[in-house]
Image (spheres, rainbow, N blue to C red):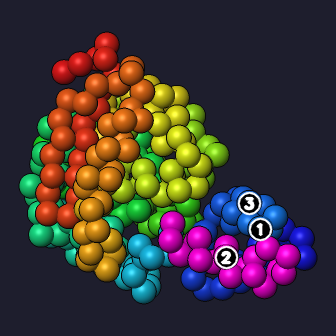
C-alpha cells in the first residue's frame, strides 16, 4: 500500500478523520520502514496518533463546544463560566479546572494589550481568554485537528475577537508570523518524542520576547512517575544560551517556565 492509501484508511476512522492529513502522512512515512506489513504500519501509526492527539480529546468535545457556542448570547470574551464549561470538554484544559483562575491570571501577567500571542498545539487553551487581565492585540492559534481549529474560530467570532486558528504540523512547520509571547503548553514532550530538539528549534526560530512553556506533572492516568525531575532536567539542560529562565512555577499537575530572550529580560 502507498502512503496515500494508508492515509485514506486511517483518516476514514472517526477518531482520526479530523487530523491534518500532512501529519498522518508524515507519521506513515516515518513508520513504513519499521514494519514489513501494512497492517502493522496502520496499527503503529494509530498508536502514535493516539499518544500525540486523540488521548487529549473527550468524546464529541467539538460538537458539545459548538452547541454551547451556538446557544450562547452573552459576553463571550469575558465570561469565565463559559470558559470553564468548554475547558471541561478537553482533557488538557480540564486538568487545569481546579486552578484555572490562578494559572491563567499568573500567565496573563506576561501578556500586554499590544502583544501578539502564538499558541502552538493550542487545543482548547484559547477558550481561557476571559481569565486574562488584558486581551492581546493578536492571537494566532495552531493545532493539528481541523475540528479544533473550526471550533476556535467560531469562538473568536462569537467573542468579537480578531484572532485566528489554523491547521499546522509543528514538527515540520514553524508559524510564519511574528509574535511577542509564545505558548507551548504540554507540547514539549510530544514534539521531542517526534523530533528531538524541535521544540527548542521553534523557540529560536520564532524569537518571541517571552516563551511560556508548560509540562505535565502527571500522566493522563494520574500517575506522577518522576515527571517533574525528568522534564526539569531535560528542559534546563537543553535550553539554548540565548534564553534565560525568568520564572518556574508549579501548580497541582502542571509546571510552567517563563523564558525570555536574554536581550529582552523583564
Horizontal side of residue 127 vs 58, given as left or right: left
Numbered range of the magenta stretch: 35-52
Q: Residue at x 42, y 86 (%)?
A: 59
Q: Main secondary structure of the magenta part?
A: helix
**Labels 2 and 1 touching (C-beta < 8 A):** yes
Horizontal side of residue 264 vs 51, given as left or right: left
Q: Is residue 42 magenta?
A: yes
Q: Earlier in the sequence, mark 2 or mark 1?
A: 1
Q: Residue at x 37, y 35 (%)?
A: 237
Q: Earlier in the sequence, mark 2 or mark 3?
A: 3
Residue under label 1: 34
Horizontal side of residue 109 vs 57, given as left or right: left
Give the CA separation, mark 3 to mark 1. Answer: 8 Å
Residue under label 2: 44
**Labels 2 and 3 touching (C-beta < 8 A):** no
Secondary structure category for the residue under label 1? helix
Task: Bin the neighbour count of mark 1 within 10 Å (Cα to Cα): few under 14, some 14-19, many 20 and up.
Answer: few
Give the CA separation, mark 2 to mark 1. Answer: 10 Å
Q: Is residue 51 visible?
A: yes
Q: Position of residue 33 (x, y in %)?
A: 81, 64
Q: Residue at x 63, y 77 (%)?
A: 46
Secondary structure category for the residue under label 2? helix
Secondary structure category for the residue under label 3? helix
Amino acid at each position: 500500500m502507498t502512503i496515500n492509501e494508508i492515509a485514506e484508511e486511517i483518516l476514514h476512522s472517526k477518531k482520526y478523520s479530523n487530523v491534518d492529513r500532512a501529519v498522518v502522512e508524515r507519521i506513515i512515512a516515518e513508520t513504513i520502514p519499521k514494519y514489513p506489513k501494512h497492517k502493522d504500519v496502520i496499527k503503529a501509526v494509530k498508536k502514535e496518533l493516539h499518544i500525540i492527539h486523540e488521548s487529549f480529546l473527550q468524546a464529541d468535545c467539538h460538537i458539545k463546544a459548538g452547541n454551547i457556542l451556538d446557544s450562547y448570547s452573552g459576553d463571550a470574551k469575558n465570561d469565565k463560566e463559559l470558559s470553564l464549561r468548554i475547558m471541561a470538554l478537553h482533557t488538557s484544559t480540564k486538568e487545569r479546572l481546579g486552578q484555572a483562575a490562578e494559572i491563567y491570571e499568573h500567565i496573563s501577567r506576561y501578556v500586554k494589550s499590544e502583544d501578539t500571542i502564538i499558541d502552538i498545539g493550542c487545543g482548547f487553551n484559547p477558550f481561557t481568554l476571559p481569565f486574562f487581565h488584558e486581551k492581546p492585540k493578536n492571537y494566532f492559534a495552531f493545532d493539528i485537528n481541523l475540528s479544533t481549529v473550526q471550533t476556535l474560530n467560531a469562538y473568536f467570532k462569537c467573542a468579537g475577537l480578531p484572532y485566528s486558528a489554523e491547521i499546522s504540523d509543528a514538527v515540520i512547520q514553524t508559524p510564519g508570523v511574528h509574535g511577542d509571547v509564545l505558548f507551548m503548553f504540554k507540547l514539549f514532550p510530544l514534539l521531542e518524542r517526534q523530533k528531538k530538539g524541535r521544540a527548542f528549534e521553534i523557540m529560536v526560530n520564532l524569537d518571541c520576547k517571552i516563551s511560556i512553556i508548560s509540562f505535565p506533572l502527571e500522566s493522563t492516568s494520574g500517575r506522577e512517575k518522576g515527571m517533574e525531575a525528568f522534564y526539569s532536567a531535560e528542559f534546563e539542560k537543553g535550553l539554548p544560551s540565548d534564553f534565560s529562565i525568568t520564572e518556574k512555577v508549579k501548580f497541582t499537575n502542571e509546571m510552567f517556565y517563563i523564558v525570555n530572550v536574554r536581550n529582552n529580560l523583564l
